[in-house]
Image: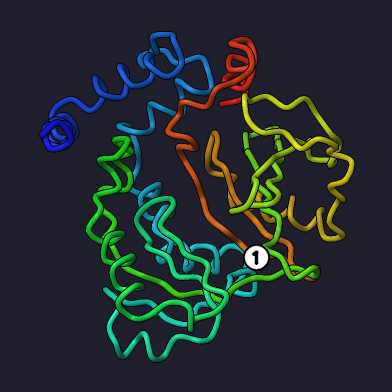
Amino acid sequence: MKPFLSHIAKVVLAKFNPEYYVKISFKANLNYTPNFKNPKTHNERTAKRRFCYTDQMTRLSDKIEVRKHVSEIIGEDYLVPMFFEMDSLTKNSYNKLPSSFVIKANHGSGFNLIVKDKSKYSYDELKKITDKWLNTKYHLIGLELHYKNIKPRLLVEQLLIDEQGQIPKDFKFHCFKNKIYIEVLIDRFVNIKAAFFDENFKIIEFPFIYKEVDDPTTIKKPENFNEMIDIVKKLSHSFDYVRIDLFSVNNKIYFGEYTFTPTSGIDKFKTYSKDVEWGTLWN
């Protein structure tokens, strides 16, 4: 009964007072009360977007709709090849799936499945997984309301594999107006760890309480790194802050996604002063 009541409470709060829910969840996670009227920290500014957002944030958070925007700004060559999109998985669409692929839902985070061998997933198994995604009202999980008006759909993309035959590193560019920090994630879906770099790919202090790479020097600067920087500058120029994810595979760059509320605005910095420092970069 409790989960049901919790869901009902979120539905009501999402409609009438989302700021209240965000404030109490924020304080519970970060141990300080946010000031959304005059936000100063990075987390305050990010969390405020959960209930104070724009139509553009909704459009660019839609994993299908964003492809048109990216194509217009930097060209379709930077898009991961998409096999098809659909309202739901059917037997006919299942039969058309290639031997390997990535299947995603467009209306949230975490709705993705890497399939290296289609034969290991029956139609019924994939149908159960994807229907669960489609039936999940993602915007209610953490009251990230810019996801609310995205119609849930599925998309199937090419599976990207790096030179070592592994899932490629995830380059997450934290883009402010005059500063870019790069968070590089390795061993995704296995034993994920991260390291931080500046826009010259110089190792910098790791800001968050998170699994750090033991030796960041083992992460090599991509040959096309300068091009990656140019791309994220073009894609982020209209925002005070946004995180843009890219992949570099076989010296080719692919767009991943826009994220406007990373970790729902409750990222645990090692120090409060670092949270404030990042907050000053918004303007």
In this image, 20 relative to 188: left or right? left
| Quadrant of the snapshot with the C terminus | top right
235 vs 265: above or below: below
Which residue is at a point 48% across and 84% down the rendered structure image? 119
- Please tell me in which quadrant of the rendered image residue 223 appears: bottom right
Q: In screen coordinates, is 140 left or right of 28?
A: left
x, y percentage for residue 109? 42, 50
Residue at position x 34%, y 56% in the image:
107
Amino acid at circle 1: Tyr
Residue placed at 45% from the left, 61% from the top? Answer: 112
The spot of residue 149 in percent (x, y) is: 25, 52
What residue is at 38 percent from the left and 9 percent from the top? Answer: 33
Position in image of residue 55 (x %, y %)? 33, 48
How are the colours assigned in the image?
rainbow
Closer to the camera in the image, 86 or 177: 86
Nearest the viewer among 36 and 196 is 196
Q: Position of residue 35 (x, y in %)?
A: 39, 11
Report the front residue among 1 and 58.
Answer: 1
Circle 1: is it few (<14), some (14-19), or many (20+) Cα within 10 Å? Answer: some
Q: In which quadrant of the rendered view does residue 128 lie?
A: bottom left
Helix, strand or loop status at disc 1: strand
Quarter in which the N terminus is drawn: top left
Residue 224 drawn above or below residue 275: below
In the shown orientation, is residue 124 left or right of residue 212?
left
- Residue at the limit of the structure toward the front, as seen here: 120
How many numbered marks does the figure carry?
Answer: 1
Disc 1 marks which residue?
254
Say above or below: 216 vs 129: above
Residue 151 against residue 216 in the figure, above or below? below
Quarter holding residue 22:
top left
